[in-house]
Amino acid sequence: MPGSRYVVILIYSTSHAIRAEKILHRAGIASKLIPVPRHLSSDCGVCLRIDPSDAEAAEEALEEAGMEIEGMHAI
Amino acid sequence: MRDVQLESEMIYFDNAATSWPKPPGVAEAMVHFLNDVGANPGRAAHRRAIKAGRIVYEAREAVANLFHAPDPLRVVFGANVTEALNLALLGYLVPGDHVITSSMEHNSMMRPLRALEREGVELTVVPCSPEGTLDLADVEAAIRANTVMVALNHASNVVGTLLPVAGAGQLAREHDLLLLVDAAQTGGAYPIDVQGENIDLLAFTGHKSLGGPMGTGGLVVGERVDVARLDPLKRGGTGSNSEREEQPDFLPDMCESGTPNAVGLAGLGAGVRWVREQGVAAIRAHEVSLTQALIDGLGDIAGVTVYGSLDAHRQTATVSFNIDAKSPSEVGLRLDDEYAILCRVGLHCAPAAHKTIGTFPEGTVRFGLSAFNTQEEVETALAAVAELAEEVK
């Protein structure tokens, strides 16, 4: 997702987000848990923010671990 | 009359009810949560909330690893094993279903089952032997066309006898049934592998051999369980799907409404990590050695009847006995007052089990040992029981 500052990965719950963070960490991908941006969802939970250059690798790592995600968005 | 008041002389043999002492690090983890974390896990995204969320997740992961469950998110936390069993039974079974259980169950299993029976769930209680053992052929013979679940304790809370859960798991697979296991007496003290033993629903408590505080426990939900069929015991805020007024349909959130006992779960996580550091095999070996010494020692005292398998390898570190011609309540009171030995006497919330072993309605004296007990404590307790038994002659 070129041109965007960050990519956020929307995920079902805080527990899921923390699990996803650990999966990404093991794959060598840095991520930060942040509040879900209001324009993406009205959910009160957290999502994962990563660098756009890691988006593809992150998607692969999560899929490999069997981790379902709600979506990925450039912000 | 002896009158032992010194705390240092106290022997705690009531670990089958709740373990004491807790492993090092448990109280510290709880104090740390209260003083230095404090926030609500999963309800906000600020640093403290995330820290709290991580602590709860670490506990989830520790439990999953201990029981060889592949997905920490299928570990549902709750208040205790009773809540977990109620979730599995009331949440899954519907009128017309048939469920098979044993005659060695605790009331945490039996009472929800009896309530379901009144609502139209069919129930078969397979009788166990007076030693508390279960013949799987009797379980297989009880299977009907509408059987959906086999629900068993892993070990009796009265006599410690282990039930053949791995065999029951295999049987459940062959007949396409779910296996629910009540691991209150075994989690942390005896190896459990939910995948290897085909356990579809594992109910555990945090405050016994897992070393955590009271108010913690949960249900490990296997891949074969149709989550869409699992009805939560309660509904409410989960910190997820907040835009919707309907309950989330995914684990663990769908079964974890309301602010969790995060302080307790911080302690549980520390307890389970301690168990994993020691190794369940090492804990088990220590407890087998204490248990066999206790069984053999009690068996050598004239006028004492010991219940169960009498073989430490076939049971947990819980031993029930009676001194002939003395009531369990009198023995319990005198062990406490005169010897500072703390144990439980009576029916142990399991009337069916007492009927099976032949101690209903009087009950038994129960010594429940843990990883922290010693051979010296066993010897001291044996000498005390021998003195009390001597009076009867």
Image: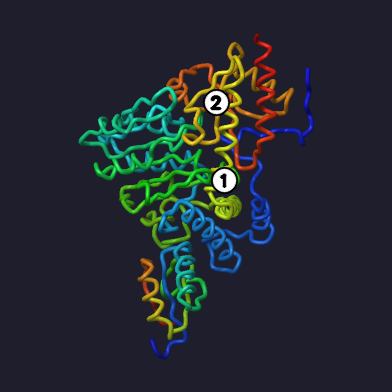
What percent of the width, then of the height, locates residue B3? 78, 23
Image mark 1: chain: B
Given the current orientation, which residue lies at the most extreme top position?
B393
Mark 1 crowd level (few <14, some 14–19, many ≥20, 10 Å Cα): many
Task: Look at mark 1 in the image and give the residue it sits on.
Answer: B283
| Along the viewing direction, whichever of B293 and B197 lies nearer the viewer | B293
**Residue at coordinates 47% horizontally, 79% vertically from top-left?**
A50
Left or right, B134 with reference to B38: left
Left or right, B304 with reference to B134: right
Q: Secondary structure at mark 2?
A: strand
**Residue at coordinates 64% horizontally, 19% vertically from top-left?**
B331
What percent of the width, then of the height, locates residue B245? 39, 56
What percent of the width, then of the height, locates residue B370? 60, 39
Quadrant of the image for the N terminus of chain B?
top right
| Along the viewing direction, whichever of B211 and B276 lies nearer the viewer | B276
| Along the viewing direction, whichever of B346 and B215 lies nearer the viewer | B346
Disc number for residue A44: none
Q: Which kind of residue does numbered mark 1 sit on?
A: Ile
Q: Secondary structure at mark 1?
A: helix
Image mark 2: chain: B
How many marks the image carries: the answer is 2
| Along the viewing direction, whichever of B300 and A20 lies nearer the viewer | B300
Q: Which kind of residue does numbered mark 2 sit on?
A: Ser
- Residue A22's place in the image compared with B376, above or below, is below
Task: Look at mark 2 in the image and give the residue it sits on.
Answer: B320
